Image: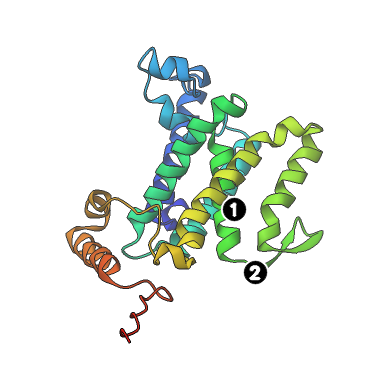
Amino acid sequence: MDLDSLPPITRLWAFSAVGLAICEHIHLTSHYALWFSPHLVFSKGELWRLVTTFVYFGPLSIDFFFHLFFFLRYSRMLEENHFSGQKKADYVWLLIFCSAALLLLSPLVTPIPFLGSPLAFVLVYVWSRRNRHVRLSLFGLLVITAPNLPWALVAFSWLINGSPKAAVGDLMGIAVGHLYYFLVDIWPREVRSGGISLLKTPIALVQLIDGPEAARERREAERAERTSTPSGDAAVAPAPAG
């Protein structure tokens, strides 16, 4: 995969992951300084761990490149096909929201020091739901539809590692991915929602990443949403008094 051909956000993630792995390889840092630990983050002030836990995919090895390729593949497809143009801020917001959810969920379920793989499953899940009619070959052995891909990968991880514990992080990623998908894609289609998403990208983030013009258009769209009558929920005029 040519890193220069990647869309900007995915490319930044790729260079960060490769750079971090190289730094560890030449002993500029250690994976002990990179994993997520609530105690070290909030008691010791080691805030960088909130980022490095998602960027570190292990030491330079075949396994590293496999996991990085897997992450970049689905990140690229999402960014190019669903978050292109003036939607880069929406993709950054997806990553921020889902990363925060994984950080909150991990200590409650099971401590996972590195959350890059669960975040990759978030991307796989969101991509699979937005491309539900796509058919693909799994390892050249089985043809499945896209919505079955996350579950097939969980089963494969379980089979390879021989323990259901190996799939806990993957299942966390699926759960967080579904939460995002519900808030952004499912709920706005409900009549009760009025077509309004429960997880809007902050205007400040839109202005920072996509520019002032995109932020202005987003404000106008949100203003129109607030003033329009929800479809199928129009008020019924009272009957005249007899």
**Which residue does the image show at 49% across and 51% down from the upper left?**
180
Which one is nearer the viewer's eye here, 48 or 61? 48
Residue 138 located left or right of residue 105: right
Report the residue that reaches farthest toward the front.
Answer: 242
Q: Can you give x and y, in whole percent of width and height, for residue 7 in the image?
A: 41, 57
Name the residue beneath numbered marker 2. 134
Any mark on residue 125, and which?
1
Q: Are marks 2 and 1 in contact (CB under 8 Å)?
A: no
**Which residue does the image show at 40% across and 66% down from the upper left?**
195
Q: Judge the density around disc 2: few (<14), some (14-19), many (≥20) Cα neighbours within 10 Å.
A: few
Q: Which of the two labelled residues, at mark 2 and mark 1, occupies the earlier sequence position?
A: 1
Q: Is residue 73 visible?
A: no
Residue 222 lies, with reference to residue 203, above or below; the image says below
Q: Can you give x and y, in whole percent of width and height, for residue 222 in the image?
A: 27, 63
Q: Is residue 194 visible?
A: yes
Three-letter amino acid code at the position of disc 2: Val
Quarter of the image that includes the C terminus: bottom left
Q: How is the image coloured?
A: rainbow
**Which residue does the image show at 59% across and 52% down from the upper left?**
124
Q: Can you give x and y, in whole percent of width and height, for residue 55 in the image?
A: 47, 35
Three-letter amino acid code at the position of disc 1: Tyr
Residue 94 located left or right of residue 63: left
Look at the numbered disc 1 and give the secondary structure of its residue: helix
Residue 140 located left or right of residue 126: right
**Which residue does the image show at 71% across and 50% down from the upper left?**
151
Q: Can you give x and y, in whole percent of width and height, for residue 177 in the image?
A: 55, 49
